[in-house]
Image: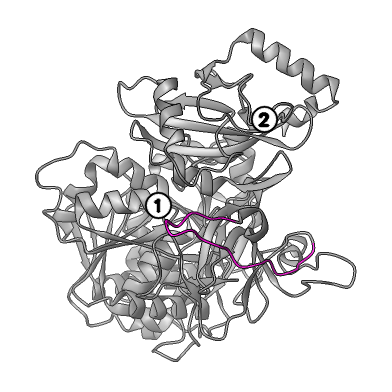
Amino acid sequence: MAATTITTHPKTPGADGPTTVAELIRAQWGDHRPGVKSGEATLTHHEAAAGAAARAALFGDLLPRGAEPHIGVLLDNVPEYPLWLGAAALAGAAVAGINPTRRGPELARDIAHTDCAVLITERAHLPLLAGLGLTVPPERVLVVDDPAHRVLLEPYEGARPDEITTTPTPASRMLLYFTSGSTGAPKAAICTQGRLAAAGHSLAGYLGVRRDDVHYLCMPMFHGNAVIAGWAPALAGGAAVALRRRFSASAFLPDVRRYGATYFTYVGRAVQYLLATPPAPDDRDHPLRTGFGTEAGTVDAARFAERFGVRLIEGYGSSEGGAALQRSPDTPPGAIGRPAPGDDLAVVDPDTGAELPRARLAADGRLLNGDQAIGELVNRGRSSFEGYWRNPEATAARTRGRQEGRVGAGWYWTGDLFFRDTEGFFHFAGRTDDRLRVDSENLAAAMIENILARYAPATGVAVYAVPDPVAGDQVMATLALRDGAAFDPEDFVAFLATQPDLGTKMAPRFLRTVAELPVTATSKVHRVALRRTGFHCPEPVWWTPMGLGRPGAAGAAAPAGSSYRRFTGEDRAALLAGYRAHDRAHLLER
């Protein structure tokens, strides 16, 4: 689920406690239990609240008259991050999470676009800012690990949370976090204090957060995953957080044991990295109870539970707050869940807005009518979507109509593909960008990935479309192979032949083999880069040039009994001639 984070549907603000994050920060005052753990350092909840108050008071003095109260935070997961989140809450300000993997003009654009009045960073990231011509003047660029920062804070260290004179409301902006859109500049989604507080309460209740729990934050805090699904429920439930500067698969279990972590958030690729670490006899010797995230897939979730004894809960909720699904004890394997009570979610045709038929599933879970049942998930009822900062066009597009007569006008369009079974459970089927149309049949990349993930030599799989020379798409897959493994085309074809849910158009026409899948800054598979590269890549590519699904079907899959061979320069030249002959060569540049 690109551009999504994991939240259950926020309950009505105030139904379960404080209605603002500021109130949650104030509630930490006087609580001397451990609150923030990082390396050898530990802050109590009281110390975290005091640190937030000092920074809120400092920010109040730094904010120019008439400026937007926005704080850019360009940090790894270090204690200053949650302290500045708390400061923003108390000051009625918004934190813009700045992605440290961005570079040059793109990085400068993110800071300028979110109207950051102050920029919080660390010495490790100063080279990224050199020569950018920042809109933030040097005196308002605070370097948290520079001794001058401590000197700057000293006059404010006696501040108390209840002494901060601003009065945030549930409607006060709290977060501006960038979505990982596949095209154009990232959009800064708005999250208010009311929505973040409600999400924290909702998740704390849903997960059964206890005051002695420790939430391990190893996903980057500039992204909604760690803040909304990790920090907020810990804050609401009175739990501690433990910080890992950057995700490390090898450090994961040592950290969990060291901090006594009971919960973590993830994205699917991080789970694959953890499963790729060498098994050890003490893999189950840890306090971890639950992982909560998205895109792990049924196969990897089962492997994770079997190896580590930890249940992964797959959730769904757009980072924009527009739609969410809730799991229940009767949610079947492979499904995400049902809508929250009162929500009106549906799977519709992306072009017409018409609701699609329910999915028919075989006894083994195989989808029988994917071409009819897979469509875009929309919210036709109430929505928590609060818009994008200074981007009315993108905001309107999320609630657009699809045709004359305004079919779907006012709905929230998620951009995600789903199908809904006859019992009302929703199943994730990928992004709308990940749709493939092969030989006039609509396919979803995620469905194919779930099948190919069963291939034992592969540690990761990504499926995406490459244009067919004549019409539609062809299926391409990238396989990350285990250390030292070589691709065996005959073994792979034998594997495909034993998969009962592999449709006749699903087998990859092209296969790329790599040591590791490319990932984004949030550890999601970088499918955009894979699509753009296609079969023009330095790694080995295999293909089925002749053995297609049926004669004359240019985009059909390889049948059982055919095989793959290396894709050569001569093959590429001949294929490009076919694209040019049908005036489709330009599609290879998409």
Residue 314, x across and y down, in percent: 40, 62
The residue lying toward the viewer, choosing from 525 and 68, is 525
Tell whether 288 sits left or right of 337.
left
The residue lying toward the viewer, choosing from 63 and 227, is 227
Q: Amino acid at mark 2?
A: Arg
Tell me which label, 2 or 1, sits earlier in the chain.
1
Asked if residue 133 shows in the view, the reply is: no
**Which mark, residue 550?**
2
**In the image, what residue occupies the spot 49% across and 76% down?**
9
Q: Secondary structure at mark 1?
A: loop
Please identify, in this view, whether the residue under mark 2 or under mark 1 is nearer the observer: 2
- Above/below status of 518 relative to 544: below
The answer to whether the residue labelled 2 contacts the one labelled 1, judged by CB atoms less than 8 Å apart, is no
Query: Quadrant location of residue 465?
Result: top right
- Above/below status of 159 relative to 127: below
Q: Secondary structure at mark 2?
A: loop
Tell whether 166 sits left or right of 386.
left
Queried whether the magenta region covers residue 363, the answer comes back as: yes
**In the image, what residue occupies the spot 40% across and 59% down?**
293
Residue that label 1 marks: 296
The residue lying toward the viewer, choosing from 27 and 221, is 221
Q: CA distance from mark 2 to mark 1?
A: 34 Å
- Residues in magenta, as a range: 352-368
Asked if residue 442 shows in the view, the reply is: yes
The residue lying toward the viewer, choosing from 277 and 35, is 277
Binning the other alpha carbons within 10 Å of mark 2 as few (below 14), some (14 to 19) or many (20 upward) gives some
